[in-house]
Image (tube, rainbow, N blue to C red):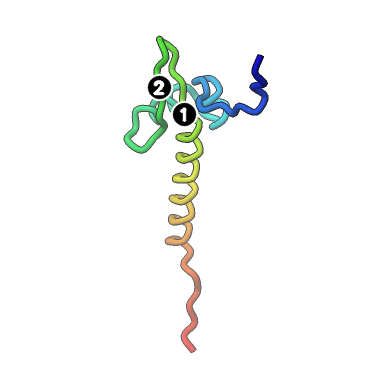
Amino acid sequence: MKNDDNLKPLTVSVATGKAMLGIGQTKLFQLLDAEDGLESILIGRKRLILLSSIYAFIERQRAAQHARQAERHPANENPA
């Protein structure tokens, strides 16, 4: 038998995706339906969320938040 201890998951269940993001099912499915939201696949009737899309979504959200903060609080430029 092969040793599968080093395998890393590529997908997570809807329940795990909700827990990872700390959101409810309605919001999760909104993100799955959004153009720049989360990606998923169906295997039979089971929906699996691509783990890479969760990480990419979080990075997009962080970048957008940093951009909004930079707009609100521009660096003080003191002319000499």
Which SS class for mark 1?
Answer: strand
Distance CA(mark 1)–CA(mark 2): 7 Å
Give, as a three-letter code, the residue at label 2: Ile
Check whether the beta carbons of the residues at disc 1 and disc 2 lie within 8 A of each other: yes
Q: Residue 73: x and y, percent?
A: 48, 64
Residue occupied by mark 1: 50
Give, as a three-letter code, the residue at label 1: Leu
Residue occupied by mark 2: 41
The N terminus lies in which quarter of the figure? top right
Could you tell me which residue is drawn at 44 percent across and 27 percent down?
27
| Image quadrant in which you'd find residue 22 | top right
Could you tell me which residue is drawn at 56 percent across and 23 percent down?
16
Q: Residue 56: x and y, percent?
A: 46, 40
**Above or below for 38 versus 4:** below
| Residue that sits furthest to the top in the current view | 44
Q: Residue 33: x and y, percent?
A: 34, 28
**Mark with earlier residue (1, 2):** 2
| Residue that sits furthest to the left in the current view | 35
Could you tell me which residue is drawn at 64 percent across and 22 percent down?
4
Query: In the picture provided, is 15 more to the left or to the right than 4?
Result: left
Q: Considering depth in this image, is 11 or 24 the residue closer to the camera?
A: 11
